[in-house]
Image: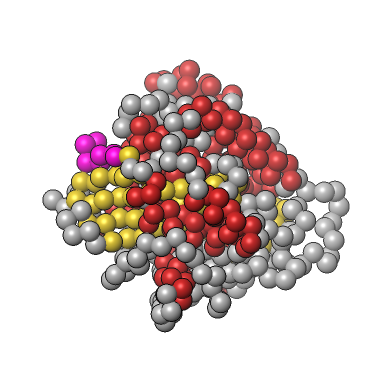
Amino acid sequence: MREFIVEADGGSRGNPGPAGYGAVVSDAATGETLREIAEYIGVATNNVAEYRGLLAGLRAAFALDPAATVHVRMDSKLVIEQMSGRWKIKHPDMKPLAAQAARVFPPGQVTYEWMPRAQNKHADRLANEAMDAGARGERWSEAASTAELDAAAGGASVSTVPEAAGPGAPAASEAHAPKAGAPAASEAHAPKAGAPAASEAHAPKAGAPAASEAHTTKADARAASEAHATKADSRADLAARADADARAAKADADARAAKAVAAPGWAPADMGAPATFVLLRHGETPLTPQKRFSGSGGTDPSLSDAGREQAERAAAMLARRGTIQAVVSSPLARTRETAGIVAARLGLDVGIDDGLRETDFGAWEGLTFAEVRERHPDDLNAWLASPDAEPTGGGESFAATATRLAATRDKLVAAHAGRTVLLVTHVTPIKTLVRLALGAPPESLFRMELSAASLSVVAYYADGNASVRLLNDTSHLR
């Protein structure tokens, strides 16, 4: 049986502030680096970024070998103690992440060990690279970071092949193909002189939407990176700060949601081209006609024959319009399959973003609404009454989903300024993005219905406003 070592870290320049994570998967027997993962995740706390790093590392290890044993090493005392079951998880943003991490491998296959921060330099470097890339309005790529390290060492730059995801791609949205040799750990990052190496990294255009509060200047980012590097090894006070972090994260999400409320009348004509997101719900799965809860914590079903036909029809319609410039998908199987069908018709690659995943419905996964009401009536009533309520068994609340989607939205708007991008995702993420764009209350989620393979469109303008267009049924399209 193979054994992997997963080292992960995350950081936030502001706590909450612009955040990112890094994770490394290595072979326990040889020490060989098998996978490097990093992502800028928008505005989040240190703790949330650390959990996101853990989750990405575990998913990358699972993609390499689901039967392997995994030993996780992190310098976050909070994450290690909570995932080991010795500390209770109270933070509303961390509960769903911890629950997802616990479900990646079967119980007993993963062990946890705390290590001093000085020994976690590899993952820490990746997290800072991701935050530096986010500050530039770019997306972290393994090839780009390698080129920077080579440049700092006086070596030659590395050419890359744009990555593409398909039905067989790793579930982790940030998982990249392993390198033949891993770069040596380094804390020095030389600024890149050329254009981004990753095919999906786009620098903001002149006149494009201004970077949100999640972005800093390069100088600020470097200064913040140095400050991040001086973080004290002891994190015993993190549990006491969790409530303050939760309030700050919620206040930030509310502020960004309020900013998205459209002003009366038509927007000025001189704002430049918006970042336009065409939101496509995946095609039917075997669970869809039965109206069963199907989130990110269930069986991850693939499309049915009807679902594949729906995806083909949507692809044909989008090809006729000819406006899509990029395709980004949730990491779940049904969305990746839908995105693959559309992207093949459009001649585009598929990018994967974990932030687009469906809500985790906990113990309700696979059940109908009536079955949930029969088995968990009190939890269901609480869930219907409050966006902060979680499904039974540690699922993800609508409030937590909204915070995640707002950060994902900000990141994608910055990366695709002035472009039209197809986001292939799920019911709750689409409803949430529409709700935030309209400035509607959380209960509006229960007043929307999205057909399988349906389309909605949200355009984000430079002044922070947004407009929504709906096309909720593609079943008639040929």
> Taking 144 as reference, is 137 left or right?
right
The answer to which quarter of the image holds residue 439 is top right
Pick whichever, 444 or 399, lies toward us.
Answer: 399
Please tell me how many numbered marks the rendered image carries.
0
How far across and down, in percent of the image, does residue 134 sit? Answer: 57, 59
Pick whichever, 372 or 117, lies toward us.
Answer: 117
Q: Residue furthest left?
A: 1
How far across and down, in percent of the image, does residue 314 sit? Answer: 52, 62
Q: Is residue 256 above or below residue 139?
A: above
How far across and down, in percent of the image, does residue 215 sit? Answer: 63, 55
The answer to which quarter of the image holds residue 326 is bottom right
Residue 67 seen by the camera: yes
Residue 396 seen by the camera: no
> Taking 171 as reference, is 13 left or right?
right
Q: Is residue 336 above or below residue 321?
A: above
Instruction: Please say whether residue 110 is one of the residues in the magenta stretch.
Output: yes
Q: Is residue 280 above or below residue 436?
A: below
Residue at horizontal 54 percent and vertical 37 percent from the top: 400
> Taking 203 as reference, is 89 left or right?
left
Instruction: Please say whether residue 235 is one of the residues in the magenta stretch.
Output: no
The region drawn magenta spans 106-113
Residue at horizontal 24 percent and vertical 46 percent from the top: 70
Residue at horizontal 42 percent and vertical 21 percent from the top: 376
Pick whichever, 319 or 434, lies toward us.
Answer: 434
Q: Residue furthest bottom?
A: 156
Residue at horizontal 32 percent and vertical 28 percent from the top: 85
Color style of the picture: secondary structure
How far across and down, in percent of the image, does residue 429 sit? Answer: 55, 46
